Structure formats: structure tokens, C-alpha cells
Amino acid sequence: MTTSAHPAAEAVPTGSTVTDRLVAANERYASDFTDPGMDARPVLRVAVVACMDARLDLHAALGLELGDCHTIRNAGGVVTDDVIRSLTISQRALKTRSVVLIHHTGCGLESLTEEFRHELEMEVGQRPAWAVEAFRDVDQDVRQSMQRVRTSPFLLHTDDVRGFVFDVTTGLLREIDPSDDPAAGRA
């Protein structure tokens, strides 16, 4: 039994690796491939930043087609320095104007802490230079990510930045209002 949503998901044959299966699938894909004649600039001029979680099929969930958007994915969909780097290239070199941020329910980063970095340091003898960016409140982390995009000096277009939480059980997006920060009312 497979837990994959893909009907062609199957066990890897003995002596093969998952990568071997992916390469074979690419060969089948390439045999019918026709160059779509697109350039690297997204048709909709939008960049989507989302979690790498395998349950998020962003193109299907957002009604997107090949060439519509730039997709930037990482653990948690958190806006890190590298995400800002990708967004800066997306905007300045490839003319995107809008940014959509998508976190999701049941994210693995909600169960991690920065202790993960300390454990890695103990295991390998070197502390990672990156932060885990774990969080407890997904809505607040979306707000923080929106703020990081809106305040980046490298981004040209920060007026159309919206954040959402994708519900992995219903497939629906819930928009996060950046002004609904419960901590903002505390002195």
C-alpha cells in the first residue's frame, strides 16, 4: 500500500533507488516533451513562497499552469535570507510584482525548536549557520514572514504581499490579516 497521492507511485524495484525511478520517469516525460517556448519570466508576475511539505500541490491548489509563477519552497515556507535573495532576483531580474506566502496546518516546524541545531552540533561537531525558524503559532509566523518581505530593502514591490494558511485536510486557504497581531496590543 502506498501513502502517495500519485497513482503511479510504486515500490522501488530491488537494486534501484528512488532517484533511479525519478530518472526513468523523466525519460518517459522527455520522450513526449515539446519546448513550450516560454522565457523565465512568470506570466502572472507572481512569486509564491510555500512550505516544502509534500502534501501541498501548489499548482493544483491555486489553479496555476506551467509558466504562471515562480515557486520558492523551504521548510515552513519561512521568509529567510535565501528567500529574500530569490524574491529579489524574481522581482528585479524577472519582473514579478506580487508575493503570496503559504504556510499550512500541521507543519513539522511547529514541533521543532532551536534545540535541533544544538543536537546537530553535538552529532557532527559543527553548529549550522542557519536558524531552524521553528514556530508555535502558524498565523503569527505568516505575519512575521509578510513583515520580512514588506521591510526588505532589496525588494522593489512590497505593496501586494499576502499571506495564507493552507488547511491540509480541506485544501482551503485561510488569509492572514497582517494587522491581527495579538501581541501588537500589549505594551
Image (spheres, rainbow, N blue to C red):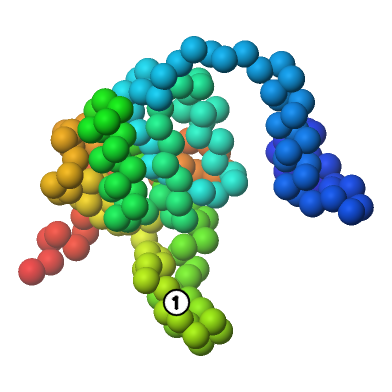
Q: Depth check: 144 or 79 in front?
A: 79
Indicate the quadrant where residue 44 lies.
top left
Q: Secondary structure at mark 1?
A: helix
The answer to whether residue 92 is visible is: yes
The location of residue 147, given as percent across then percent down, is: 20, 50
- The count of marks equals 1
Q: Residue at x 12, y 61 (%)?
A: 185
**Horizontal and vertical percent position of residue 8:** 79, 34
Q: Residue furthest right?
A: 14
**Badge 1 amino acid:** Arg
140 left or right of 111 in image = left
Q: Is residue 25 left or right of residue 185?
A: right
Q: Position of residue 146 (x, y in %)?
A: 25, 47
Q: Residue at x 49, y 12 (%)?
A: 37
- What residue sits 33% from the left and 43% below the top? 86
- Horizontal relation, residue 88 to residue 185: left or right: right
Position of the C terminus by quadrant: bottom left
Depicted 9 relative to depicted 125: above or below? above
User: Which one is in front, 27 or 140?
Assistant: 27
Residue named by callout 1 = 117
Q: Position of residue 27 (x, y in %)?
A: 75, 29
Extreme residue toward the left, this view:
187
68, 113: nearer the viewer: 68
Indicate left or right for 10 with 86 as reference: right
* Visible residue check, residue 175: no
